[in-house]
Image (cartoon, rainbow, N blue to C red):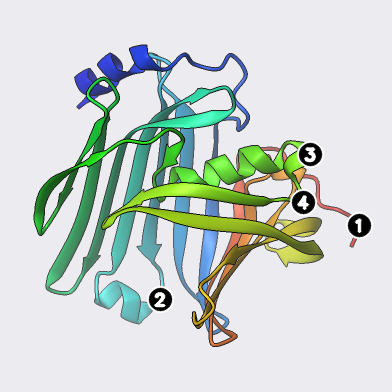
Amino acid sequence: MMTGICSMTVYATEDASPPIPAHTATYDVLRKGSKIGEVNVRLERLDNGVWYYRTSTEATSFWARLLNLSAEESAHFVWRNGRIVMLTYHQVRRSPGRTRFLQQRADWEAGITHVSTPDGDREIPLEDNLVDPLSLRLQLAAFLAQPDKRNATHTFRLLDRDGIETKRYTYDRRDTVSVPVGCFNALRVRRIEDPDSIRTNLSWHHPGFAWMPLRILQLRKDKPLYDLQLQASSLPLTPDDC
């Protein structure tokens, strides 16, 4: 796989100063106010200039451990002019009696991405500025780091399991958020859903964490479904007086 990654980097010039620094982080995963798991995050620059972003979700509650629930995501990419150029994406979700996976490998020379799922393989034409489900978070943070884009609506072309779709995120309001690492005067972002959607996705961002999310809250019919809260990071964090 790394051979393919190295060969694809010739089509994307790496930014000298990437907008998001390398770091590790851990989030608590809560459901109905109780902790059920942890998400461990790692962002690092490899020796060949390619960036590697990985998350792994581990169950901590008794029943979740008993069911052996877990998930992993990883992506390789390079930064070019403040934007992500995707190279590979890999996702695995495990539950009793079932393992789902999604693999994407971009071939920018041929203009296609190779997609593999349990249903088979397919090829999808590439578009400029495509993001995968994982690196979308990094690209949103990179936009928020720019003052003129902080209070705007951001449109992404997302390459997911079923093809390319449009996702939009917009400034919601300034808001105080309290998470295990402290209290912050943050910027709240909302994902724009279809008019008939019963889901709401909110995230809180702060410059002290390189505009990465301090908290991600998913609601269904206005009731909390999953709540991810930052509990540790290798980046130095200075909470606000709130």
First reached walking from the N terminus: tag 3 or tag 2:
2
Residue in the image at 28% along x and 22% along y: 5
> In x, y percent, where is residue 54?
40, 42
Q: Is residue 191 left or right of residue 4?
A: right
* Dots 1, 3 in contact, CB < 8 A: no
Q: Which amino acid type corresponds to the residue marked 4 in the rendered image?
A: Asn
Q: Quadrant of residue 27?
A: bottom right
Which numbered circle lies on residue 5? none
Could you tell me which quadrant the N terminus lies in?
Answer: top left
Q: Nearer the viewer, residue 168 or 35?
A: 168
Q: Is there any visible trace of residue 25 in the rendered image? A: no
Residue that mark 4 sits on: 151
First reached walking from the N terminus: tag 1 or tag 2:
2
Crowd band around label 4 with a 10 angstrom C-alpha radius: few (<14), some (14–19), many (20+): some
Q: Nearer the viewer, residue 235 or 107?
A: 107
Residue that mark 3 sits on: 148
Residue that mark 1 sits on: 241
Disc 1 versus disc 4: nearer the observer: 4
Give the CA separation, mark 3 to mark 2: 42 Å
Crowd band around label 1 with a 10 angstrom C-alpha radius: few (<14), some (14–19), many (20+): few
Q: Which amino acid type corresponds to the residue marked 2 in the rendered image?
A: Ser
Give the CA separation, mark 1 to mark 2: 33 Å
